[in-house]
Image (tube, helix red, strand yellow):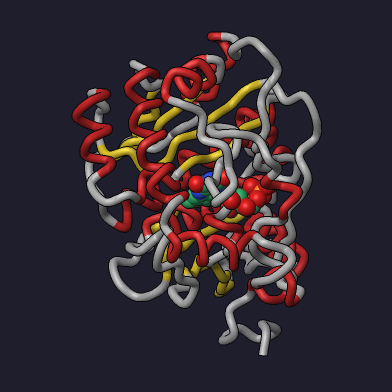
């Protein structure tokens, strides 16, 4: 094995990086990423061929997903005792490049988050009664670590309930939107019926009402505004905001979201993400104005004490994650 200051990543190290990226959350579990390993550098490649024209017309969630994968990639490289720096090419399909070199052991907080990667799952259920402790919430918010991202607990849950209720009722009645969602979630037809290893399995969605539901389908109960406000008030919500709507901002929001989600997992908490309502045209501007948010909302994270284990979602074979132009990558 090489031990020089610029030692290339060994196959076992590449395998650890690929596994960590594979476990990242992604919009509709679409896993829109590949890795390209070049010596000591790793490119996280955005798969622009993964498209969700109705849910994610601008590809914002795809980049947030790549950001979540980047957080895992960084943690895995640090767990391999690599010192890292990250660069962001301004064009092309590379979302970010993680540069590594042999370093020391990571901080305990990073190591704990790395070990939480395999335990984190989307928890689309109601939480145990009682909000999370203020000390835990403070540690979750400390995990953001991205200067351009502000994670805030939204004030005025009544207003938020009114807005979320409206947006999700629009999506529930939108036939084209629901057709696309079926293709990514239904297991009797669509991608999963064909044995796909992406998409959200029925068991992971469950039949809870909003906000636990996460994704509103034709049959998902959306409580009236008063009831929804009560449900929101019983949970801990964190909204991730950025000043800009750029590629870099979306990646940073995804990184921050995943760090907070992993930190919640470290604390024995569970959570899920809501972006569906944020894709209704003009919706985010309303949310900013009515809730006084410090930037454009990119994702809403709900978090609490789990009452049961959430089922896992499938993943693409690890070999599919290595870019085709890399020796050993998929053909
Ligand atoms: C950018 C992004 C957007 C997401 N949007 C939603 C959403 O609106 N509703 C939802 O229930 N889950 C959402 N998710 C969660 C994914 O569906 C989930 O990560 C994926 O199905 C994999 O499952 P896992 O989180 O259990 O690993 C989102 C995840 C990401 C990264």
Q: Farthest bottom residue?
A: 331
Q: Is residue 85 visible?
A: no
Query: In the rendered image of this protein, does residue 78 appear above or below residue 16?
Result: above
* Total number of numbered discs in the rendering: 0
Query: In the rendered image of this protein, does residue 269 appear above or below residue 121?
Result: above
Quadrant housing residue 153: top left
Please provide percent x and percent y for residue 274: 49, 41
Please provide percent x and percent y for residue 286: 22, 35
Quadrant housing residue 125: top right
Query: In the rendered image of this protein, does residue 273 appear above or below residue 1?
Result: above
Quadrant in the picture for the N terminus: bottom right
Quadrant housing residue 295: top left
Horizontally, residue 106 falls left or right of residue 308, namely left
Q: State the residue at coordinates (27%, 41%).
A: 284
Quadrant in the picture for the C terminus: bottom right
Please provide percent x and percent y for residue 200: 66, 56
Q: State the residue at coordinates (34%, 16%).
A: 156
Query: For this rendering, which residue is in front, 165 or 191?
Result: 165
Horizontally, residue 236 falls left or right of residue 322, namely left
Query: For this rendering, which residue is in front, 299 or 325?
Result: 299
Query: For this rendering, which residue is in front, 258 or 125?
Result: 125
Horizontally, residue 217 falls left or right of residue 120, namely left
Q: State the residue at coordinates (65%, 71%).
A: 190
Please provide percent x and percent y for residue 86: 43, 54
Q: State the residue at coordinates (53%, 24%).
A: 140
Horizontally, residue 310 falls left or right of residue 278, namely right
Q: Is residue 281 visible?
A: yes
């Amino acid at each position: 094995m090489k031990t020089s200051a610029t030692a290339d990543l060994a196959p076992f190290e590449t395998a650890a990086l690929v596994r960590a990226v594979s476990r990242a959350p992604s919009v509709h579990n679409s896993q829109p990423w590949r890795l390209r390993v070049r010596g000591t550098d790793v490119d996280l490649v955005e798969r622009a061929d993964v498209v969700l024209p109705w849910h994610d017309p601008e590809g914002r969630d795809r980049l947030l997903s790549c950001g979540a994968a980047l957080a895992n990639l960084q943690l895995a490289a640090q767990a391999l005792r690599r010192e890292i720096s990250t660069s962001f090419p301004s064009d092309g399909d590379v979302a970010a490049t993680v540069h590594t070199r042999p370093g020391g052991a990571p901080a305990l907080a990073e190591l704990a988050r790395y070990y939480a990667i395999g335990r984190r799952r989307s928890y689309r259920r109601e939480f145990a009664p009682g909000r999370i402790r203020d000390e835990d919430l403070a540690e979750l918010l400390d995990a953001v670590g991205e200067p351009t991202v502000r994670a805030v607990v939204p004030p005025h849950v009544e207003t938020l309930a009114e807005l979320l209720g409206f947006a999700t009722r629009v999506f529930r009645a939108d036939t084209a939107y629901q057709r696309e969602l079926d293709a990514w979630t239904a297991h009797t037809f669509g991608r999963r019926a064909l044995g796909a290893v992406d998409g959200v399995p029925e068991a992971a969605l469950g039949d809870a009402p909003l906000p636990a539901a996460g994704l509103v389908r034709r049959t998902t109960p959306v409580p009236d505004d008063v009831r929804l406000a009560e449900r929101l008030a019983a949970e801990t919500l964190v909204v991730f905001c950025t000043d800009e709507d750029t590629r870099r901002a979306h990646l940073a929001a995804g990184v921050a979201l995943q760090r907070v989600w992993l930190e919640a997992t470290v604390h024995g908490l569970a959570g899920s993400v809501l972006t569906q309502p944020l894709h209704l045209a003009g919706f985010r501007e309303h949310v900013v104005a009515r809730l006084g948010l410090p930037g454009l909302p990119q994702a809403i994270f709900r978090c609490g004490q789990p009452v049961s284990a959430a089922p896992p979602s499938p993943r693409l074979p690890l070999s599919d994650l290595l870019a085709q132009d890399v020796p050993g990558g998929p053909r």
